[in-house]
């Protein structure tokens, strides 16, 4: 019986992930690290309010067997590139470093299709640099998920994402071969793929792009 730790639990994929974890008997407890009280209640759910800038607060909360990172924001919501990086890179790597010091063997994170630490695109460069930092920590098992546009009902409207998903779906069947990984994917599918991979616990570094995630999450 494993204990899962989740950051980014209130986001689109995070909410699906927490639901999937709570329904799976492989996990006896799901600990979600949040900034504000969370209304969700479940016998196996433990909601812990933390200050993501305070390592002591995080260290007290990060105890378990499998760490899931679904954390992420947008430039619009963050306000500046600096604030965006503080969330996507800063929180992820800070939590990961604590998890590694505590010998948590598995780290699973959501990144993005096209993530590259040398990209000219700030978003993709930040995602790539975050991946790079996590890989350098050398968990027993590191699993990076690079979905394309996520499909699902968000609490907030994101015009750029909506437009991208519309176009991706419009040309869905034209995206074949090496372009198949750019097809839109349901957030719930990504969540189920993460749970499946965590349960398999295959040591080493594993990177899954959208088409591979689709197959795993079915």
Image (cartoon, grey):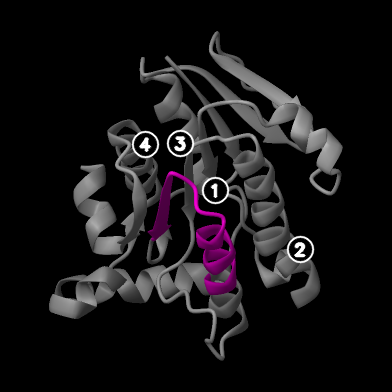
Q: Which residues are magenta?
A: 128-146
Callout 3: SS: helix
Picture layout, residue 129 above or below residue 49: below
Picture layout, residue 8 above or below residue 5: below
Q: Viewer-nearest of labels 4 and 2? A: 4
Label 4, label 2: how far apart the Cα atoms are: 27 Å
| Residue at which label 4 appears | 198
x 79%, y 45%: residue: 52
Tell which circle, 4 or 2, labels the residue nearer the N-terminal end.
2
Callout 4: SS: helix
Tell which circle, 3 or 1, labels the residue nearer the N-terminal end.
3
Callout 1: SS: loop
Residue 86 numbered mark, or none: 2
Tell which circle, 2 or 3, labels the residue nearer the N-terminal end.
3
Label 2, label 3: how far apart the Cα atoms are: 23 Å
x 37%, y 70%: residue: 166
Residue 17 numbered mark, or none: 3
């Amino acid at each position: 019986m494993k204990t899962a730790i989740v950051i980014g639990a209130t986001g689109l994929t995070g909410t699906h992930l927490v639901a999937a974890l709570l329904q799976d008997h492989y996990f006896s407890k799901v600990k979600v690290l949040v900034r504000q009280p969370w209304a969700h209640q479940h016998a196996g759910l433990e909601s812990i309010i933390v200050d993501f800038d305070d390592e002591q607060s995080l260290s007290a909360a990060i105890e378990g067997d499998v760490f899931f990172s679904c954390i992420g924001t947008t430039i619009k919501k963050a306000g500046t590139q600096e604030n965006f990086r503080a969330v996507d890179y800063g929180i992820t790597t800070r939590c990961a470093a604590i998890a590694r010091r505590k010998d948590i063997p598995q780290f699973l994170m959501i990144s993005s299709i096209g993530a590259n630490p040398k990209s000219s695109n700030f978003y993709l460069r930040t995602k790539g640099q975050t991946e790079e930092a996590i890989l350098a920590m050398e968990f027993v098992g590191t699993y990076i998920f690079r979905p394309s546009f996520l499909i699902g009902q968000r609490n907030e409207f994101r015009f750029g994402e909506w437009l991208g998903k519309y176009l991706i779906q419009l040309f869905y069947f034209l995206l074949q071969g090496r372009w198949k990984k750019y097809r839109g994917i349901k957030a719930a599918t990504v969540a189920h793929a993460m749970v499946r991979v965590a349960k398999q616990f295959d040591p080493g570094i594993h990177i899954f792009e959208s088409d591979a995630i689709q197959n795993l999450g079915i």
